[in-house]
Image (cartoon, rainbow, N blue to C red):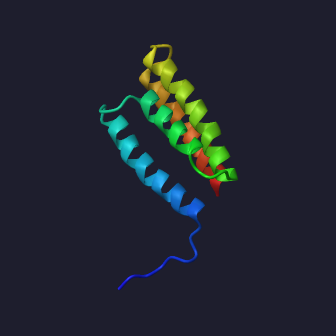
Amino acid sequence: MAVLAGCSSPRDVALEEFTRWHDSARAQAQAGMLTWSELYKQSFDRLTALPSSLQQDTRLENTVLLLSTARKYEANEIDAQQFAAEREHIETQLQARLR
């Protein structure tokens, strides 16, 4: 039996698909199978393809910050502990802004 989700807009569906992809890609980055900068570069590319929304804008802003931080880490300008702390701080701010 098929159930239609009439309450979900295409924008909501696109964001849900992005979130599923991002969660999987983030796990790959944590496992060392994907560089952090590549994760955030792909995130940026995927976010810019989504329909415009305030949530998209907020996620893009944070993705740019995360990409910059990842590049500093990969260039050995900051250590793993600093990178983890910065990443956690930026991601916590993002979650607070999306509520």
Q: Is residue 28 above or below residue 37?
A: below
Report the residue at 36% width, 47% height from top: 24
Residue 11: give x, y in percent of width and height: 59, 59
Q: Is residue 2 above or below residue 16?
A: below
Residue 77: percent from the left, percent from the top?
Answer: 50, 13
Where's residue 57, x and y in %?
67, 45
Residue at the right extreme? 54
Identify the residue shown where x is 55% and y is 32%: 66
Q: Do we see residue 82 in this rendering?
A: no
Would you identify the image quadrant in which residue 63 lies?
top right
The residue at the point 59 percent across, 32 percent down is: 64
29 above or below 74?
A: below
Q: Camera-side residue: 3 or 92?
A: 3
Circle count = 0
Say which residue appears at 40% left-offset and 41% top-offset: 26
Depth order, front residue of 86/10: 10
* Residue 80 picture quarter: top left
| Viewport quadrant of the C terminus | bottom right
Residue 57 in sight here: yes
* Quarter the N terminus occupies: bottom left
Q: Position of residue 94 (x, y in %)?
A: 61, 46
Asked if 19 appears above or below 82 in the picture, the reply is below
Foreground residue among 56 and 75? 56
